[in-house]
Image (spheres, rainbow, N blue to C red):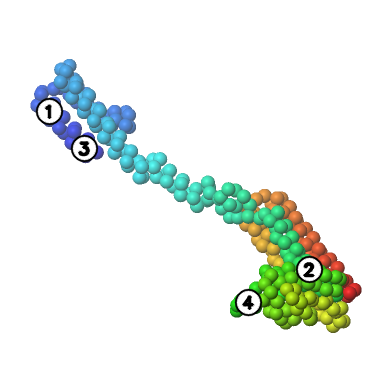
């Protein structure tokens, strides 16, 4: 604005010194508030008027644009709209939804984790011997090698010789004694016998007391698995609440809750059924 005023004064002085008949008037257009009119047909006067009007309007427009960008109509309002959109979360993901729009809750992932929990329980059952030779009963055994505990399966191969005997084929003959000792002290009620590069492990018929303790151990493992399954369901329900707040429809949310509960009930029952089978096996041998 200051530059426009300076131009106006400079040109006015030149026109006045040339004795040109001219007047200033207001324009009806907001972008050109001042119009310099020349009442003289002299070429010099016309040229000066055109130059002054163009320079003044251009600088006034620049000034108005800068002012409008800060607080003018359209400038401030635009900024306020952006801030309001940010507060409302428009254009952004929120709540339980990922940036890609995916839900926090994943039914397939929930089923996979519950299934893995059940499989771990069944593997634990396999390590609980019930009077028959099963290589899995030696899975808990670890052997001390150079002041470190190493799983037996990393040092030897366990196979079934007959229904009542396991054979442990040692990779390093020097470890035969250490492996025999580890099996004996593992709390499995086994009395292994070293035989050259192998260790023979007779599987005795379990006593009544041992059967009962084994049954309690199986029950404890089952309860642990059921607790994990319940926790998985609870975590899934929390994720569904987030998804509901983030915009998921109530019908879809309710449907997924029912499916999560159905999965929970199924895997709980599967764990209980597996315990019944294992208990029957323990007591039968």
In terms of sequence position, does the residue under pointer 2 or pointer 4 come before the other? 4
Element type at mark 1: helix
* Displayed quadrant of residue 28: top left
Cβ–Cβ below 8 Å for labels 1 and 3? no
Q: CA distance from mark 1 to mark 2?
A: 114 Å
- Residue 14 numbered tag: 1
The residue positioned 73% from the left and 68% from the top of the image is 157
Q: Residue at x 71, y 57 (%)?
A: 112
Q: Is residue 35 visible?
A: yes
- Residue drawn 46% across the image and 46% down it: 82
For marks 4 and 1 on the same chain, the one whose residue lies earlier in the sequence: 1
Q: Is residue 52 left or right of residue 177?
A: left
Residue corresponding to mark 3: 3
The answer to whether residue 31 is above or below residue 177 is above
What is the quadrant of the N terminus in the image?
A: top left
> Mark 2 packing: few (<14 Cα in 10 Å), some, or many (20+)?
some
Q: Position of residue 164 (x, y in %)?
A: 85, 74
Give the image location of residue 27, x and y in percent.
29, 28
* Circles 3 and 4: CB atoms closer than 8 Å: no
Q: Secondary structure at mark 4?
A: strand
Q: CA distance from mark 3 to mark 2?
A: 98 Å
Q: CA distance from mark 2 to mark 4?
A: 22 Å
Q: Which mark is residue 280?
A: none
- Camera-near label (3 vs 4) is 4
Q: Identify the residue at the far left of this view.
A: 17
Displayed quadrant of residue 211: bottom right
Residue receiving disc 4 = 145
Residue on which disc 2 sits: 159
């Amino acid at each position: 604005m200051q530059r426009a005023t300076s131009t106006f004064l400079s040109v006015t002085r030149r026109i006045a010194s040339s004795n040109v008949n001219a007047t200033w008037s207001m324009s009806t257009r907001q972008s050109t508030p001042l119009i310099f009119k020349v009442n003289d047909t002299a070429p010099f006067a016309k040229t000066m008027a055109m130059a002054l009007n163009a320079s003044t309007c251009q600088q006034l427009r620049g000034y108005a644009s800068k002012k409008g960008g800060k607080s003018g109509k359209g400038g401030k309002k635009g900024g306020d709209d952006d801030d309001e959109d940010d507060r409302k979360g428009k254009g952004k993901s929120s709540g339980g939804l990922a940036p890609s729009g995916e839900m926090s809750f994943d039914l397939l992932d929930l089923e996979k984790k519950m299934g893995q929990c059940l499989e771990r329980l069944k593997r634990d059952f396999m390590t609980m011997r019930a009077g028959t030779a099963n290589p899995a009963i030696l899975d808990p055994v670890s052997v001390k090698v150079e002041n470190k505990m190493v799983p037996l399966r990393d040092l030897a191969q366990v196979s079934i010789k007959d229904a009542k005997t396991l054979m442990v084929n040692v990779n390093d003959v020097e470890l035969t004694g250490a492996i025999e000792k580890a099996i004996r002290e593992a709390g499995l009620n086994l009395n292994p016998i070293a035989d050259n590069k192998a260790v023979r492990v007779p599987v005795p018929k379990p006593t009544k007391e041992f059967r009962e303790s084994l049954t309690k151990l199986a029950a404890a493992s089952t309860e642990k698995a059921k607790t994990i399954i319940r926790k998985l369901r609870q975590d899934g329900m929390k994720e569904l609440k987030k998804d509901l707040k983030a915009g998921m429809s109530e019908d879809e949310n309710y449907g997924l809750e029912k499916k999560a509960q159905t999965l929970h009930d199924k895997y709980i029952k599967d764990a209980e059924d597996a315990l019944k089978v294992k208990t029957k096996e323990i007591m039968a041998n």
